Amino acid sequence: MDWNEDVMDELERIGFQLRGLYQRKGFARYRMSKFEEYDLYSRNKDFLLSEGVITFTDTNGRLLALKPDVTLSIVKNVGDCGAGLQKLYYHENVYRVSAGADGFREETQVGVECMGQVDGKAISQVLELAAESLALLSPDYILEISHLDLLGALVDSIATDHGMREAMLKCAGEKNQHGIRELCRQAGLHPGAEEPLISLLGIYGPPKTVMPRIRRLAEENGCEEAARELGEAVASFAGAEAESHLWIDFSATGDLKYYNGIAFKGFLQGIPDPVLSGGQYDALMKRMHRKDRAIGFAVFLHRLDRLEGGARG
Amino acid sequence: MSQMLNVALPKGRLGEKVYGLFAQAGFECPALLENSRKLIFENEAAGVRYFWVKPSDVAIYVARGAADIGVAGKDILLEYQPEVYELLDLGIGKCRMAVAAPEGFEENPARTLRVATKFSRIARDYYGSKGREIDIIHLNGSIEIAPILGLSDVIVDIVETGTTLRENHLEVRETIVPISARLIANKSGFKFKRAAIERLMAGLEEQAK
């Protein structure tokens, strides 16, 4: 049978190009059912990108859901691999309530998950793959990287309770320094207590420029290990073309119940929301009684609707 | 063209005040103050394009990337929780979100409190944090009339001077949160137009000193 590539629309073409990239890098395709036990999502509600799950009762009485997320299913269904590294990719539809959408939408995402002995080298490889994915979409991209353990440590050093911690992390994600100062004032903290966190949020830009300041700040606050990991993660880009697209920014946050260590987001010129999101999720693995460490990312194909053809590399 | 800094300004007195701050920070566009019905104004030399929008819509323009930056009240940010950066508190347009009730009103804790408001999320979060059961009556304007006509027990609304409340025999019972105008930015736009936005922020901070 003849294969005519023209039958694919632009988003399908991008999806297959990404799959080709991940296949070439040694990732194996992971296929999954459209349905999953609802219980998985009710136990990990905060992990989902949106509230609301489409549920139905199967013929045998089990309560099932149309998948609102891919990572949870992979974590649940793939066993520990111990000393090795499982490298998987997927190309799946998920069902979510998107911001601005009146009800549920079907969204397509392509992504990778890496589980097992996730060391510095594996983290760098996933970051490089994220950068390559973005480069495939547009030459005008930025891969924003942060380290949640460093951010979390500075938040925990001043947050007096869980509510304040959550509010401060929200402010961090919004680059809202005046909000953090106000929270500290309301909590009656001594003046200046928030300065290390404010300094961290004020440091953003290319790794070469900002890493020395991050190391210094981390050293002063006993977080050298996190700064070392961040430095190691971006070091593999040294001298490569992709290095000029890296941006360290601690406003790239995540729910610390699930995420830890390196977190990252990908942005394209002209698209208002991140088109790629990922990071380490050892904390989620632990919550699901898994021994492996893990890192992964997803590319949100539906957000590429507004990408102009000419911008693609 | 694409590297112009797109700015959504809230229509009205606050927007004019904000433009004054931006102009002083080096982002002038004199045509903006001319008496015309135009909505979009550009100064290519300064690399800036302004547009007037309804104050409650500023955050939508910014979150959706039609504007790189904008100025929105904290009330709108709290109510609609847009995915934007909140870069600066401009310290203007100051007022407060408050609970007001008819003079002499005595709350009965055994009954569900009926709350009339335009700001349902703020009201729900506030009373939720106190564990108080409420019945939200969402209105789009003239909130003060609700308790007078017995539609609600209290209102949650913006209070600036308190004159409207006093004239209608209402009084502030609790302040929920202070409100002021905030500089917001689209998360993607901030990264690709960083230099211009930082120059603007530096200019605004200089004026605040």
Image (tube, coloured by chain):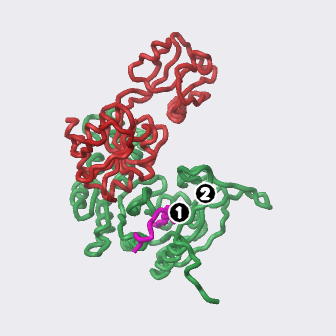
Chain colours: A green, B red
Residue to which mark 1 is pinned: A302
Q: Is residue A70 left or right of residue B197?
A: right
Image location (x, y in percent) of residue A282: 47, 62
Asked whether residue A308 is drawn in magenta, I would say yes
Q: In this view, does B161 lie to the left or right of A67?
A: left
User: Which amino acid, by three-letter code, is at mark 1?
Assistant: His
Image location (x, y in percent) of residue B169: 50, 11
The residue lying toward the viewer, choosing from B67 and A192, is: B67
Q: Label 2, label 1: how many angstroms apart (C-alpha)? A: 10 Å
Residue to which mark 2 is pinned: A105
* Residue at left offset 61%, top offset 68%: A77
Q: Is mark 1 on a helix, strand or loop?
A: helix
Say whether marks 2 and 1 touch (CB < 8 Å).
yes
Q: Residue A200 carries which label?
A: none
Mark 2 or mark 1: name the one nearer the start of the chain: 2
Q: Quadrant of the C terminus of chain B?
A: top left
Q: Are marks 2 and 1 on the same chain?
A: yes
Q: In which quarter of the image is residue A277?
A: bottom left
* Residue at left offset 66%, top offset 56%: A38
Question: Can the viewer see residue A264?
Answer: no
Image location (x, y in percent) of residue A179: 35, 39
On what subunit does the disc labeled 2 rest? A
* Residue at left offset 40%, top offset 69%: A311
User: Which amino acid, by three-letter code, is at mark 2?
Assistant: Arg
Q: Is mark 2 on a helix, strand or loop?
A: strand
Q: Is residue A19 left or right of residue B51?
A: right
